[in-house]
Amino acid sequence: MQTFSDLRGQRRPTTDLPLFDAPATVRTFDAPEFRGITFYEVEAKSILNHVPAASRMPFEWTINVYRGCSHSCQYCAAGDTPILMADGHTKPLEEVRVGDALYGTVFDGKYRRYVITDVLDHWSTVKPAYRVTLEDGTELVTSGDHRFLSDRGWKYVIGCEQGRGRRPHLTVNNKLLGTGRFAAPPEGGSDYRRGYLCGMIRGDGHLSSYAYVRPSRPGTSIHQFRLALVDIEALQRVRAYLAELDVATTEFVFQAVVGARKQLSAIRTSTRRSIEAIQKFISWPHT
């Protein structure tokens, strides 16, 4: 099981606490279950820590039971659970890292809206897992304490109707709220790679071959291919697909950062064999 915290905590300056030698970071959260609670984050090398002699506390040791998220978040999901990132693509939960931006929700008093939030922590844990199967066939593997936003509010995965375990939990009469099932990515293969190269190079690339004659020299042939993009992931994918087709390219900075303009990275090649190969790859099929 993987778990992560994407709560946007409000961080304040550090403060000194009588129980610890190192300063503590003061943090608060807007989540309903932690509203009004102040957390003091300190770095500790072990679970048991000796109380400084100058402290007036009536005990000699402190026990730090939490590791990772300071509020001991229990909302865990399987590592292969797709997470909707801020740029629109999905990433398995196990590959999410601190600093990544993803989509969350916030309640503004009347409506719940999507917001982009930053991942502040990420770690793994082992606990019993439960599989929730939705009407469209989607399967969600989470911990029993994980909560989903339904048409009747937040609901835990498991719970009881009465007794100590009584709490709102999912039933077959609930509908989950959210973006819905993620579309399956396109399948790979030679046809997909050729279509991808055709679209990227014809749409944004520069591909040319020409010759010019000088009075004192024989004709000279010039072959050029260049593709410049802001999206470095797409550029690297094009370069990798061309490499699989035995077309080597070099990467360079086409335009540096200037004011509000982002950096443009590019790939290029100028050999006749490579240019002819690219022209063949992106040609329109006869059938």
Image (cartoon, rainbow, N blue to C red):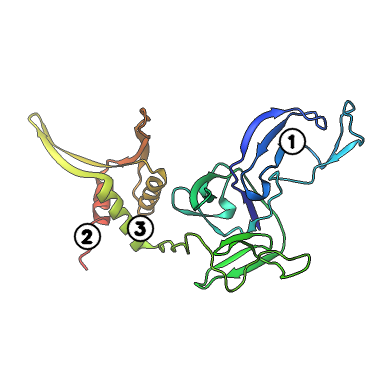
Could you say where residue 64 lies in the image, as x and y percent from the top left? Answer: 80, 42
Left or right: where does residue 164 sit relative to residue 260? right
User: What is the three-letter code of the residue carrying label 1?
Assistant: Glu
Instruction: Give the foreground label among 3 and 1.
Output: 1
- Crowd rating for badge 2 (residues with CA inside 10 Å; few <14, some 14–19, many 20+): few
Disc number placed over residue 43 in the picture, else none:
1
Q: Nearer the viewer, residue 116 or 248?
A: 116
Disc number placed over residue 284 in the picture, else none:
2
Q: Residue at x 78, y 37 (%)?
A: 45
Are the residues flagged by discs 3 and 1 in contact, CB closer than 8 Å? no
Quadrant of the image for the C terminus?
Answer: bottom left
Say which element carries label 3: helix
Disc number placed over residue 193 in the picture, else none:
3
Of pointers 2 and 3, the one earlier in the residue sequence: 3
Residue 114 higher or lower than 162, as above or below: above
Left or right: where does residue 11 sit relative to residue 46? left
User: What is the three-letter code of the residue carrying label 2?
Assistant: Trp
Say which element carries label 2: loop
Q: Nearer the viewer, residue 250 or 30?
A: 30
